[in-house]
Amino acid sequence: MAKTRTSYVCNQCRTSYNKWAGRCDNCGEWNSLEEQSEGSGIGATPIKGASKGRRIELVPLHGDIVEAPRYKTGISEFDRVAGGGIVPGSALLVGGDPGIGKSTLLLQVAAKLADSGKRVVYISGEEAIAQVRMRAERLKIQNSAVELGAETNLSNIIATLDDPTKPKPALVIIDSIQTMWSDNLDSPPGTVSQVRTSSQTLIRYAKAHNVAVILVGHVTKDGQIAGPRVIEHMVDAVLYFEGERGHQYRILRGVKNRFGATDEIGVFEMTGLGLAEVTNPSELFLGDRDGQTPGAAVFAGMEGTRPLLVEIQALVAETSLATPRRAVVGWDSSRLAMILAVLDAHCGLGLSKHDVYLNVAGGLKIKEPAADMAVAAALISSISQKPLPKGTIIFGEIALSGATRNPSQSAARLKEAEKLGFSQAIIANLHQKKPKNEQKGAKNGQKTAENEQKMGLKVAEVNHLMDLVAKLAANMT
Ligand code: TYD
Ligand code: MG
């Protein structure tokens, strides 16, 4: 009989120790070591009852592929982010801050799928039946055939799902994974070992019975799904539901998907009747801007396959502090530092005695470097206290040398701007030499840009940040 060894693992940084200690030597966290018996870790081979093993069939790379069928929920903003619908037997993690609207979204998804004739089970570990019913009433979906349970014990949940008198559900929603606990473990719910064991059990169930499961996970303050990302790699897809509490917009963002693209976003608006889909997000993020405020520039961005116009706001003010303040909401602060340095080094716009605040309107988070030129334009406009030319969109990446570069999908960005009534675009030079693999795309972009010009959108091209500064100085009202 194999000997069971016990080790202690830090639930923050996963460092393993032979002895328990009050503080993890590696990350310095207090009281984070958890007992773990060998074999319970991911990837660890169970020692008990290990047999000689069975030979598996090895196959060639080519062969028949069965395209995974998908359950379309009919909430297209959700389906798109999930890669075109929920794949049967797959496990999905929906993470987000408490109160952002995860339960609301998933109850709506559950009801839609149940309405299409699928069996959907919704297990709430956080709220009592009455609370979920109240939410359903508010959302006006109380008559859908969703089967509701309030339970946190994993064995009870599996036993319920395994009921031989009923067909297997198409989808099971577990809200949330942090409330689930397995009686095989001593640690309390919410700890890494509980979250991991519960997820493993549910995912195994999902794969074995071809049942899709959606796990809801709360995100901690530092942006990690509590139980430091332990379940992210176990599931097939990870979606984050994000947004600012004060704003009504919510964004569902795919960060991992084994069955589809990950850069898609779904945009929702939280209303009194639950989450409403926003089919034209650009209109929403541009809001009711008057276009005459200094320090505001409209960036034509891409979120996956969708163009998205957003306003970037900058405020530059002289500082009385020794170290000026730099505050960024919705963009990368080191990227801002870089743009400021380039403006200083190549354009002589010294901002070392100025506080700089940067904000992306609508609570959106932009990750694209293509926003560089729009950020620079907003900064220049704020310093000079002159608004940018009316009806202008800007995009393009800025190198440390100050040279500008067009991002991918320029044509789609220009088209969206045109559609929303913009009259001018300031972008990097479309005729510049591109890396070999992008030359074809550049040609297409060039052609389309010319077409756009014909259609009414004036495209102004700049080669260097200095050109942008000069162009803005000449054009600003
Ligand atoms: P909830 O789905 O409970 O969030 P989570 O599960 O992520 O913790 O949503 C909570 C918030 O949503 C709450 O502050 C109330 C608001 N809300 C609405 O504005 N309209 C609605 O129709 C519903 C159901 C909730
Ligand atoms: Mg909830």
Image: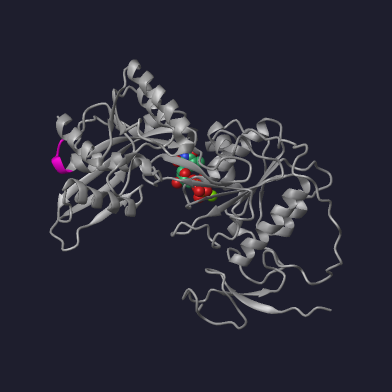
Residue at horizontal 86%, vertical 67%? 51
Residue at horizontal 40%, vertical 43%? 368
Residue range (magenta) = 383-387
Total numbered circles: 0
Instruction: Considering the whole magenta stretch, tell me its main secondary structure.
Output: loop
Task: List x then y, in percent, for residue 427.
Answer: 31, 33
Task: Work out whether residue 387 can be spotted.
Answer: no
Task: List x then y, in percent, for residue 307.
Answer: 43, 32
Decide whether residue 189 is among the magenta residues.
no
Give the camera-side residue of 235 and 376: 376
Q: Is residue 304 left or right of residue 396?
A: right
Q: In this rendering, is residue 223 above or below 377?
A: below
Give the camera-side residue of 359 and 195: 359
Decide whether residue 384 is among the magenta residues.
yes
* Render colour scheme: one colour
Q: Is residue 57 left or right of residue 96?
A: right
| Figure quadrant of the C terminus | top left
Q: Is residue 109 left or right of residue 167?
A: left
Q: Is residue 370 left or right of residue 12?
A: left
Task: List x then y, in percent, for residue 359.
Answer: 30, 45
Task: Work out whether residue 214 can be spotted.
Answer: yes
| Figure quadrant of the N terminus | bottom right
Q: In this rendering, is residue 262 above or below 176?
A: above
Residue at horizontal 55%, vertical 39%? 81
Extreme residue in the top direction: 454
Residue at horizontal 12%, vertical 59%? 320
